[in-house]
Image (tube, rainbow, N blue to C red):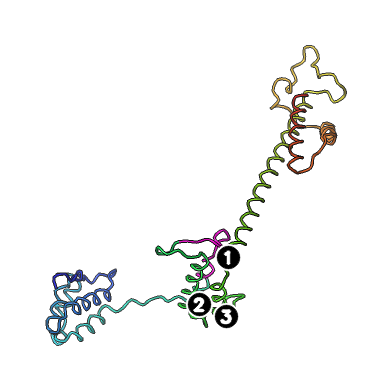
Amino acid sequence: MANIPIPGWFHGKPDENAQNFLKGVEHYIVLSDLKNKTAKVLIFSMLLSAGLVADIWWMKLDSTHKTMWIDVKAQFTTRWPAITIAEKTGLDYQQDILVIHLKEEELGTQIMVAGVPTWAHMKFRIKLLELVNEAGKEELTMPGIADWNKFLTKIKGIDTNKLQEKAEAARKKQEVEKAQNTHIARFENLQTDAVEILRLQLQHTNLGGNQTMMNPKGASPNPCQTNMCQCQPLTHEEKDLLRKNIDNILHQLDTAAGRAEYEEQLKWWFNAN
C-alpha cells in the first residue's frame, strides 16, 4: 500500500481539472482496496488543500452530504462540473486529412515506427485510417473517394516491388532533369559572358572602321577609355552590330559534344580578342 501513488492536492483553482483529481482519488481507493465508506470520504477530504477554495467549500458543505462516497462525488461534480470537450466536426477531420500527405520521394521507402520497420505508404494508411474511424466513414466525405474501405484496402494491397521500381525510375528521372537544368544554366551563363565581352569590345572600337576611337587634342578623355563602368548604354547602331557579330558566331547543338565544342570556340575567341 505504501507503493501506491497518492493523488496531488486539489485547490479549486479555475485552471485545475477537477475530474482528473476525482479520478485520481478513485484510482487510489481501488488500488488500496478500501471497502470502508468513511475511509473513502476521509481520504478525499485530506487531499483538499487547506484554507483554499476547495477546503472552504468542504467545510461549508452540509454534513448530510459527507457520509456516503457517492454523495460526496455528486456534490463535488456539481460544484466543479466536467469541462465540455469541443469535439471535431466533419470539416475539421477533412482539413486534418488534407494536411497529411505522402511525399513522392517517400514512395517505396522503409521507415521505422516504434522500432518496427514498415513502408512509408503503410504509415500513411494507418494515420488516414485513424482519422477516418474517429470521424466516422458516413460523416466524412472527400472529393474522388466514394468508399473509404475500398480506398484504404487499395493502399494496403499495393505491390511494394512494383512501387519500388516505379519510385526508383521517378528518382532517376528527377536526377537526369536536375543535371540537364544545371547544364542549361551553365550554357546560358556562358552565352551571357560572351555577349558581355562583345559589348566591352564594342565600347573600345570605332563602329565606322578599324581605327581606335581617339579624343581630339585637348579634349576630355572618353569615359569608356578611363572607366568602362561609366559607359553609356549601347546605341541602336551598336546593338545592331552586336547582333550581327553574335549571328556570325557558329552555334552548337545542346549536346555533350556540342557544349564541348562551344567551350573550345569561346576559348579561341577569348585568345583572339
Between label 3 and label 2, give the one nearer the viewer.
3
Count of numbered badges drawn on the protein: 3
Farthest residue in the top direction?
217
**Res 143 → quadrant:** bottom right
Which disc is residue 161 wearing?
1
Where residue 237 sits in the image (x, y, percent)? 85, 32
Secondary structure beneath disc 3?
Answer: loop
Q: Distance of mark 3 from mark 2, alpha carbons?
A: 16 Å
Q: Distance of mark 2 from mark 1, alpha carbons?
A: 36 Å
Residue that appears at 54% across and 64% down: 102
In the rendered structure, the answer to whether residue 181 lies left or right of residue 101 reads right
Between label 3 and label 1, give the one nearer the viewer.
1
Q: Is residue 97 magenta?
A: yes
In the rendered structure, the answer to whether residue 266 lies left or right of residue 138 reads right
Secondary structure beneath disc 1?
Answer: helix
Q: What type is the residue that disc 1 sits on?
A: Asn
